[in-house]
Image (cartoon, rainbow, N blue to C red):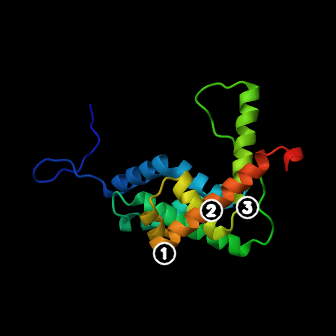
Amino acid sequence: MAAHPVLMTCTDAPVVDAQEVRKARFRGIVADHFSDVWRFLRHLGIDAHGVDDAAQDIFLIVWQRLDDIRPGSERPFLFTTAFRKAQSLRRRRLEEVAEEVVDDALDSSPTPEQRLDEKQARDLAFRLIKGLEEDLRVVFVLYEVEGFSMQQIAELVDIPLGTVASRLRRAREIFQTRFERYMTPRGAR
């Protein structure tokens, strides 16, 4: 039986192929973070037709810079890169952001009525978030949706911690006011 040739060191331990290790790390990063990056881009206003391309660009950057990314720092690197990519795309885009929301795959099989209710709730949340000014929206999404701490947001967006706190407070107030206005029956307004 012929064995595949394996490089051996003087201690007879197999030599680990650095390129294979690099590929495995990259595949792990994609598997662990792709959906988070994709969702974050959507919350930052990237339309449904452009979000796949933007996410792909981000992961191409990760591949190119993989050796520079410290293990354990992948998520901050991805979100910083996604934030910068979204800013770049917004600068180039003059048209309005489409209001299409992609339904997430759910583990259970909800009834059609439940799916409609969930879709309507997501659509409303997306519209309310989209209505926030960009500087407020970024802080709100990073904190409320993505679970970043205020300190992490301050570092990511490169603003003082106090500014993060005030933007988050204002974003919450505006979001709550608009939500209450939406939920108030038209005759009661």
The N terminus lies in quadrant: top left
Q: Is residue 60 left or right of residue 41?
A: left
Residue type at mark 3: give it: Gly
Q: Position of residue 170 (x, y in %)?
A: 61, 65
Which of 42 and 15 lies nearest the eye of the viewer? 42
Residue type at mark 1: give it: Asp
- Mark 1 or 2, closer to the camera: 2
> Few, some or many C-alpha atoms within 10 Å of disc 1 (few <14, some 14-19, many ≥20)?
few
Q: Secondary structure at mark 2?
A: helix
The residue to which callout 1 is attached is 158
Q: Secondary structure at mark 1?
A: loop
Q: Is residue 106 visible?
A: yes
Give whichever of discs 1 and 3 has the lower sequence position. 3
Residue at image point 10% right, 53% down: 10
The residue to which callout 3 is attached is 131
Quadrant of the rendered image containing residue 108: top right
Q: Position of residue 84 (x, y in %)?
A: 57, 70
Residue at image point 73% right, 61% down: 131
Give whichever of discs 2 and 3 has the lower sequence position. 3
Q: Is residue 63 visible?
A: no
C-alpha distance separating marks 1 and 3: 23 Å
Residue type at mark 2: give it: Ala
